[in-house]
Amino acid sequence: MSEAFDQADELGPAKIIHVYEPTHQLKGILVVDNVACGPAIGGLRMAPDVSTGECARLARAMTLKNAAAGLSHGGAKSVLFGDPRMPLQEKDQLIRAFACALKGNDEYIFGPDMGTDETCMAWVQDELGGRAVGLPRTLGGIPLDELGATGWGLSSAVDAAMEYVDFTLDGARLVIQGFGSVGIHAARFLVERGAVVVAVADSRGAIHSPGGLDLEKLIRLKSDGRGVNEYPQGEKLQRDAVVGVPCDIWIPAARPDVVHGGNVDQMDARLVVQGANIPFTREAEQRLHQRGVLVIPDFIANAGGVICGAMEYRHMSQGAACQAIAEKVGNNTREVLERAGSQQVPPRQAAETMAVERVQGAMATRRWNLFWWHRPR
């Protein structure tokens, strides 16, 4: 727990809960970072190697993401220790047990994240009622994976960033690190606008072809449960080697800290649009900024999913959600890049300043200058 307290500051975290229930081999963590703007929305992540520190960093990213997007929600994150590919019945029991253990924490709204999906949110909804977004369509949800909300937001960020780079999207070489739901949808939207996918990576490996890869073939491989390294043409690479593939646009859409001080100098890209949460270390971003590589921070670029969740929470339509994502992500990307340019600072610094200003403005209206949010009974 000290990892999270070491990161504590004037914004939070407000609450850290550790859950352990040996009967179900349940071990999980909830970090509620800040709820001054309203009840916190944050995804439930499932992986064998999550940690309190990672959960706290992700919760802070959600605070900044929701504030930057102008949502009336604070930030939180929950993590479950376990293999997300476990048998469905075991996963059902584990997620339901975790949801039940967090009853009474009404300031937290679950959403899907890495290792969880709309079915998992349906289990949470069944146990808690009204405290999950990203639900199946049959339960009134706007399915994030079907809509590709995060990928749509990433493409909107790219569109906005085109005003600040010296190349066009038509013919731009695109690399996707983490060819799952977010990466696939981002690739689809950008290929429709003229980008060319030259390399992709997933947990099993990577494939590279300077002349371009057939996106539909790659998607069919993933649909069949196979890895991208089974693509029949091109150069097969180790998973992490995709960092050094020459390209115009590089999108990380997998785990945290995939680009760090040890490999950032291999990167040969002109624009990075962060689809994953905290995918780069601060050192890596600073080095890229010094080299003139434009990096759109995670909580600006990948806010499409939580914007969609917030719209679902208010029972808005899918069309309204798509419009809100394009407008909010596009406008925020432009504002951050304008601030970064005028202040001569990296985009992340400009984005954090903008988001913190919004959170502090909300905190100033609270009676206790609160982290806590209480729903009237």
Image (spheres, rainbow, N blue to C red):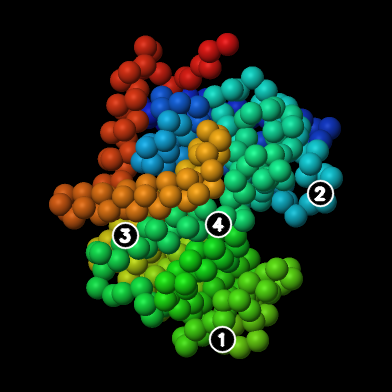
- At 65% across and 39% down in the image, what residue appears? 140
Horizontally, residue 204 falls left or right of residue 259, namely right
Q: Amino acid at mark 3?
A: Ala
Residue that mark 4 sits on? 148
Q: Is residue 309 above or below residue 31?
A: below
| Residue marked by disc 2 | 88
Position of 113 with respect to 189 (left or right) is: right
| Sooner in the amino-acid sequence: mark 3 or mark 2 | 2
Compute the Cα span from label 4 to label 1: 28 Å
Query: Distance between the Cα atoms at labels 3 and 2?
Result: 40 Å
Secondary structure beneath disc 4? loop
Q: What amino acid does circle 4 point to?
A: Gly
Residue at the left extreme, as displayed:
342
- The mark nearer the N terminus, 4 or 1, is 4
Q: Which one is earlier in the sequence, the residue at label 1 or at label 2?
A: 2
- Residue at the image position 47 percent from the left and 45 percent from the top: 320
Dot 1 corresponds to which residue? 235
Q: What residue is drawn where x is 30% and y is 66%? A: 162
- Label 3, label 4: how far apart the Cα atoms are: 18 Å
The label shown at residue 160 is: 3
* Secondary structure of residue under mark 3: helix
